[in-house]
Image: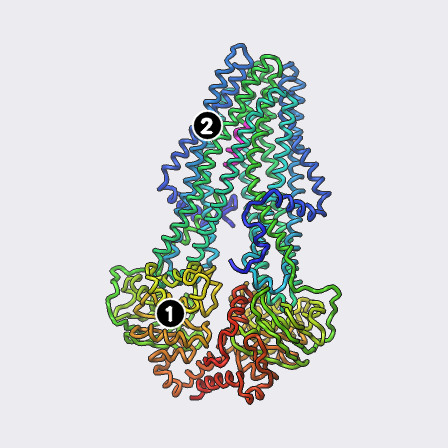
Amino acid sequence: MRGQGHWADLVPDETISRHDASRLLRRLWSMLGGYYGRIIAASVLLVLQVAALLAGPTLVKYGIDRGIGHHDPAALNGAAIAYLALAFVGLLLGRAVTLMIARIGEGFLRELRGTLFRHLMSLSMGFFEREQTGRLVARMTSDIDALQELTSQGLVLMVQNILLFVGAVVVIFVLSWQLAAAVLVIVPPLYFASRWFRRVSNVAYRDVRDRISTNMSTLQEGLEGIRVVQAYAREPQFTERFNGTNEAQYDANLLTVRLSARYFPAVEFTSVLGTAVILGFGGWLVHRDTITIGVVSAFVLYLNNLFEPIQQLSQFYNTVQSAGAALGKVFGLLDTHASVSERAGAFDLVERKLGVDVEHVSFAYGDGADLVLHDVSLQIAPGERLALVGPTGAGKSTLAKLLARFYDPIEGTVRVGGADLRDVTFASLRKVMCVVPQEGYLFAGTLRDNVRIGHIDATDADVEAAVRALGVWDHFSAFPLGLDTEVQEGGTRLSAGERQLVSLARAALADPGVLVLDEATSNLDPGTEHAVEQALERLMQGRTSVVVAHRLSTAARADRIAVIDAGGLAELGTHDELVAKQGRYAKLYEAWQTHHVEAVQP
Amino acid sequence: MAVTEPNGFLETDRARRRIGWRVMRDAIRPHRFWSWVGIGAGLGWAIARVAIPKLTGLAIDRGINSQHHELTRWVAILLTAGLFQALFTGIRRYAAFRLAYRVETDLRMRLVAHLQSLHFGFHDEAQTGQLMANANSDLQQINQVVLLIPLTIASTLTMLAVIVVLVASSPGLAFFALIALPLLQMSATRFSRLMFPIGTSLQNELARYSGVVEESITGIRVVKGFGAERRQVATIDRQADGIYDRSIAAANLRAWFLPLIDLLPTLGLVGILWYGGHQVLDGHLTIGEIVAANFYVLMLIWPLRMIGMLLGQVPRAVAAAARVHDVLVTDPVIVDRHGARPLADGPGELRFEGVRFAYGNGRDVLDGLDLVVRGGEAVALVGATASGKSTVARLLPRFYDVDNGRILIDGVDVRDLQLRDLRRAIGIVFEDTFLFTESVRDNIAFADPDASMEAVRRAARLAGAEEFVSSLPQGFDTLLGQHGYTLSGGQRQRIAIARAVLAEPKVLILDDATSSVDPTKEHEIRAALAEVMRDRTTLIIAHRPATIALADRVVLLDGGRIVADGTHDELLATNERYREVLARAEIAEAPDPDGGAGNGGAAMASTRDVGDGPVDGGGSR
């Protein structure tokens, strides 16, 4: 995988070292600052809940020894009533703890989602061009989901189980240290079996996840490429290939089954062994009058409180591991700094209609990469319309990105109205200068919402006015619900031309003084083609405009044309000047014109 | 989701439930053996489990609480029972999980094999994500139930045995021990049912949230271009609030039910202590029996929760199975006719006779198309957007079948030919190139994986791809990333052309196959294409005059039929509509990856391609 940032590799695998874990935990703890009070309160309630759970068997012991042993029905009734009351107290405490922890955990995740997204939006264009969309989406979604698994239930159950285990050990030692010591003999084998199981099942489950993802991507590819597969009649081969990955997934699953088919019998046998120890050794102690029979009964019940936690804790290990890995990736993203950022003391641009000066600008994508632009200088007067033309990869779109400060030049300066772009605030720059990718990308929502992206505080009337000003009102009002028509994500229901109109309407609403336009390359149907051209013309009226032109007809209409070739400014002048000069532009134009004319007039 | 409503099933829901059950039953049937093993081992397990508390009670009463001094014997018996329990639990788990995974794997294979056989029309409508969900989460839902069935049967047996044993020893004690337990199962079921809609709405909320994340990143150029970060942040905050609310609703439900599920068995323990204690005082029961009863109550917690889980899971699995069934019963429309024959040798003459076609229930795209292409002839199809030219290309290999009229290859209706033969005889290059996540070589050798390296190189050379492929890090062994994103659009198209060339098709179809190739590069391919097309029937869909010039003859499509027929020069000279269509395509022409979408591939391509094409390199810029 190419072009991924260092942060994605922070945690290469879904296992984290102890050192990383403690670092992550410290940082997480510091992020939980606002919740300390509630965390302490929840912890106190949790301790009380566990105490209520642990008191039960002791009451059984009291009931048996006192009530039955001493023939005291009142004590028996008392023990039963106390047990009942404790059970209900436990219910209420359990409810309170679950709710409190959920509010803390979910609240934290809500904040984290917001923080992470704000940070993401503040990162520079270069970051987004480097990173794969899927990876970034994963940071915001599946990684946070992994944390959610921990916060929603995992953490509270884990703490509860630890408390239960420790509490049970303390209580049984108080009841009878001899019997407790004997019972604890079963803990080491259980612990080691659980650790073994955790280790091997970790590997096995990771293998399962890998194979599921291989299998699913094979399937996805098969579905997306179904037309090619069918066109070449390769269905049997694909089916065979999928059968391979599908069976591999089954085999991986079966391995986990084999492992658990070894582990769980061992656990169940250990449990019986524990009971046998309690009865055998406990019985011997009863005969020697060291303990009462009530103690033996209580031990039998406490055995559960020893077993459950050990087994459950080994399961939480996985949850904790993947949450830790996710947390590491999330922190990694938070630590990525914007390469283009607003410097302290940046000032606001006030004037709107400004000129743009490019002074000895050089640029490369990344350190050590080849220069894409080399010492380019260019002045654009306020209100002027400049077209950038040149072959694929010459650097004209890159120049446009520098004008908009999507990137900073590695050498030289870009000025708007005389001010270095690096000295002005982003907010004011975006009010003065808009970058319009003409291929209209649509967001989920209505047409109106989509146009409003140009100026998010605009009223409905503003939106309509902008659409009218652009002369495309008829186009939009022709939709079933006019501007309130919902457009799907990706804008599948709008044609390419209609999407371009949306994009231009955004710019009209933003009403910037300087416009940087990347002309669309997609084919349009004749109906909208004309509308797009007209709208574009109206939009550029009275604004400083820089157009990355893909059509020479657009270039020919500009005030001046800059020919960019191999990262440098090859020619600059008006259309007529450049044609007269008989240079590159002239050749380009000639070739285009002969074709054009040839096609239209034989 | 009406299916999950506890009462008031609609008739259709009932029908769908039956379908869902049938799907699961049919999937289990071939593996009955393992379900019987699971149930058998479950039975043994249940017996051992039920015996253990009884033995414990006896050990207390006879071993500890009496003067028999038989303690060692009882402990030995107890451990033996424990060994059996352990053995059986291993077997029953293995059998149950094995069965569940086997059923899931089989169903997935059936589903995918079936999807492969379904026609283009189905895939046009279906969303990949939905089909993936069928093959993944739906099958997992089914897996869960298949898994729980043998486990639950064992649990139910345990439960019945416990009830019998307890009632036999003391009906009163059994009453107090068990009275709260049905509530446990009911709570677990109710919890699962109530949780489901909340879980679904949480999932929806999460999906909407990730939709916003995705569009913010995909549309980052728009967001940053207009400084609209604030709007997206506000949207995310709203979605995060939605997720919070749903999660808290889920937690609220959990906070009622989970402590309740913990509480109910405790009520049984309290009942045993109180009632049993008094019974012991009165001499009707022994302490050992009380301890055994405690054991039984604890033992029933998991089986009851499991039954609750199963009951909650069943509606979901049944609905999932019905959805899988929906796909499985979709009949492939395009299949071999009875008695379909193999394609005989022939020149590859194509004949379209009165062909009418519409996608779904839409308007006619082709409206009585008549066209004859002689064997070995190259014909260019030219027409405005939506004139039906790509549709012609899709009907020939039977991606769709004509609504009316017929298409003949060497005089045989394509519907009378064996589909495999027909498709192997036609090499088609689509406009939107799909490459597989495999090496360049494997992509080119797609039609014939056993092709020699010479053949692959030759195909690459003819497609004008050899040069750039050789310059890739591992040459022909270079793995293409997901959808081949590391290559530019033009490079991908050239690989796709090589793929078609390697298939040595009798008929070649180039559907706008060079549209993304830089015009300055196209002439290199053009010479090679001419070579490929020699003596091969070829349909070219194109709008660049230079590409059209490769064809012997041009036909102009308009409104779903052919309106003009002749050479490029003839049509230019005589046909106003033809000139118009070409001129329009001309204006729209000019791809430029430098200005492309903001992903890594485009940025890298642009740096690599610096100085790639001379400004005066001809073409139509």
Picture coordinates of residue B535, whole percent (x, y): 29, 74
Magenta span covers which residues? B297-312
Quadrant in the picture for residue B266: top right
Q: Which residue is mark 1?
A: B461
Marks 2 and 1, how far apart in space? Answer: 69 Å
Picture coordinates of residue B402, whole percent (x, y): 34, 68
Q: What's the chain of the residue with tag 2?
A: B
The residue under the point 71% across, 76% down is A417
Q: Which residue is mark 2?
A: B85
Between B583 and B367, the one nearer to me in the picture? B583
Mark 2 residue type:
Gln
Using the image, determine if residue A154 lies above or below residue B90.
below
**Does the magenta run of residues contain B151?**
no
Characterize the magenta stretch by its predominant secondary structure. Answer: helix
Q: Is residue A329 left or right of residue B418?
A: right
Label 1 Cα neighbours within 10 Å, binned few <14 / some 14-19 / many ≥20: some
Q: Nearer the viewer, mark 2 or mark 1?
A: 1
Picture coordinates of residue A426, whole percent (x, y): 69, 67
